[in-house]
Image: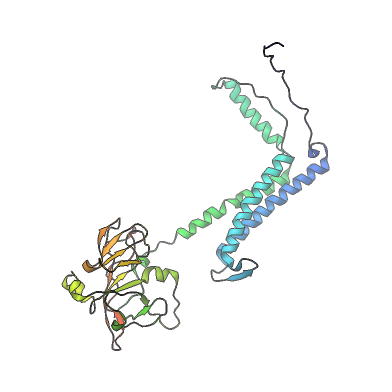
């Protein structure tokens, strides 16, 4: 037996198999209608997104099996965007597989630098390809594709609306005012100085006015931590000390670094810790930053008692709570 390797023969290309739409005008027309339907479904999905975004209220819920109560606006936005992108993609794939040219083409290798003749040939081939794709001969696909594609970009533009309007002074304001009663969270129960022992911590929020509803945005700015120390443990100036009451001091719970909830208190060291990025604040020194990336102490809320002995705010926060923002002056 010879050990010499024999070259493989050129296998060539298998015989081209024509698709049904290539030889049957009825099948081609049916495929064209299917593509147009898919593009139309894409357009309807985008319109569903737009309608849900602008006209469905945020507090409307509907019941769906398995999912339970579901926010109608979020459901419409999600399904609308998904259908808009899904059906335009499926339509393009179906168009390519059934109607666009599928002849095998052999491209000979050549130098990377193209000659002017080759460039002209490319332009000519592109024009011939566009003609072969049938855009000119299939107006139904052309119109439905233009409609779906024109609408497909709208969700991205509409979502830019959520970046505005500019907050103005809203980020500098909270619901704390002079005389606002501190209530427990959860429970909304007024809290007295005697409810806190030395070393105790409580989360509080401003008391709601009759008919007022508390929103997540309110909680994100209004949450306050009450901590009780022995008065002799404070290292505060006279003004800051006057903002406390019998060893009880109040700080914003919103971290001044990235807005996380400062929820960990070390009773032994008198330190507040943010669990997100480990910023550490010294309670005895007006929540001064002693470790971590935060650049500012936690804002302190001045507190006192009302005529019934309940803790109340003496005045609003003297500075904005939470992390830095562009319009912040401090």
Place of residue 35 in the rendered image (x, y in percent of width and height, measured from the top left)? 72, 47
Of 248 and 26, nearer the camera is: 248
Q: Residue furthest left?
A: 238
- Can I make out residue 172 in this image? yes
Residue 198: quadrant of the picture: bottom left
Of 63 and 229, nearer the camera is: 229
Image point 69% across, 53% down: which residue? 40
Image point 81% across, 43% down: which residue? 27
Task: From the viewer's perspective, tell me whether residue 129 is left or right of residue 297.
Answer: right
Q: Is residue 90 above or below residue 166?
A: above
Q: Residue furthest bottom?
A: 308
Place of residue 57 in the rendered image (x, y in percent of width and height, measured from the top left)? 55, 69
Place of residue 166 in the rendered image (x, y in percent of width and height, measured from the top left)? 40, 61
Question: Split into 4 quadrants, where in the image is the N terminus?
Answer: top right
Task: From the viewer's perspective, tell me whether residue 140 is left or right of residue 223.
Answer: right
Residue 233: quadrant of the picture: bottom left
Question: Split into 4 quadrants, where in the image is the C terminus?
Answer: bottom left
Q: Residue furthest front?
A: 1
Which color mode does the image show? rainbow
Q: Is residue 189 above or below residue 69?
A: below
Q: Is residue 41 above or below residue 250?
A: above
Residue 116: quadrant of the picture: top right
Place of residue 133 in the rendered image (x, y in percent of width and height, measured from the top left)? 70, 37
Image point 52% across, 54% down: which residue? 157
- Can I make out residue 136 in this image? no
Q: How many marks?
A: 0
Of 165 and 230, nearer the camera is: 230
């Amino acid at each position: 037996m010879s050990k010499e390797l024999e070259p493989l023969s050129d296998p060539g290309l298998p015989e081209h198999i024509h698709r049904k739409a290539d030889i049957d005008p009825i099948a081609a027309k049916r495929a064209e209608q299917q593509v147009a339907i898919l593009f139309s479904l894409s357009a309807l999905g985008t319109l569903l997104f737009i309608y849900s975004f602008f006209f469905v209220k945020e507090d409307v819920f509907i019941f769906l099996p398995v999912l339970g109560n579901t926010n109608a606006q979020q459901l419409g936005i999600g399904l609308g965007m998904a259908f808009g992108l899904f059906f335009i993609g499926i339509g393009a794939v179906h168009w390519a597989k059934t109607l666009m040219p599928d002849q095998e083409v052999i491209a000979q290798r050549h130098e990377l630098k193209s000659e002017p003749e080759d460039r002209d040939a490319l332009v000519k081939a592109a024009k011939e390809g566009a003609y072969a794709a049938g855009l000119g001969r299939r107006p139904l696909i052309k119109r439905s594709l233009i409609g779906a594609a024109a609408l497909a970009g709208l969700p991205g533009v509409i979502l830019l609306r959520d970046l505005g309007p500019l907050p103005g002074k809203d980020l500098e304001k909270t619901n704390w005012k002079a005389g606002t009663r501190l209530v427990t969270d959860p429970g909304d129960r007024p809290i007295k100085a005697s409810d806190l022992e030395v070393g105790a911590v409580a989360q509080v929020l401003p008391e709601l006015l009759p008919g007022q509803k508390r929103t997540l945005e309110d909680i994100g700015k209004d949450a306050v931590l009450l901590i009780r120390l022995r008065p002799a443990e404070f290292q505060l100036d006279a003004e800051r000390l006057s903002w406390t009451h019998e060893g009880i001091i109040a700080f914003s719970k919103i971290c001044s670094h990235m807005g996380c909830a400062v929820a960990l208190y070390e009773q032994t060291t008198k330190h507040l810790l943010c669990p997100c990025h480990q910023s550490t604040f010294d309670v005895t020194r007006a929540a001064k930053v002693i470790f971590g990336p935060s650049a500012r102490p936690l804002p302190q809320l001045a507190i006192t008692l009302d005529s019934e002995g309940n803790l109340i705010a003496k005045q609003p926060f003297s500075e904005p709570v939470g992390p830095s923002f562009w319009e912040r002056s401090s």
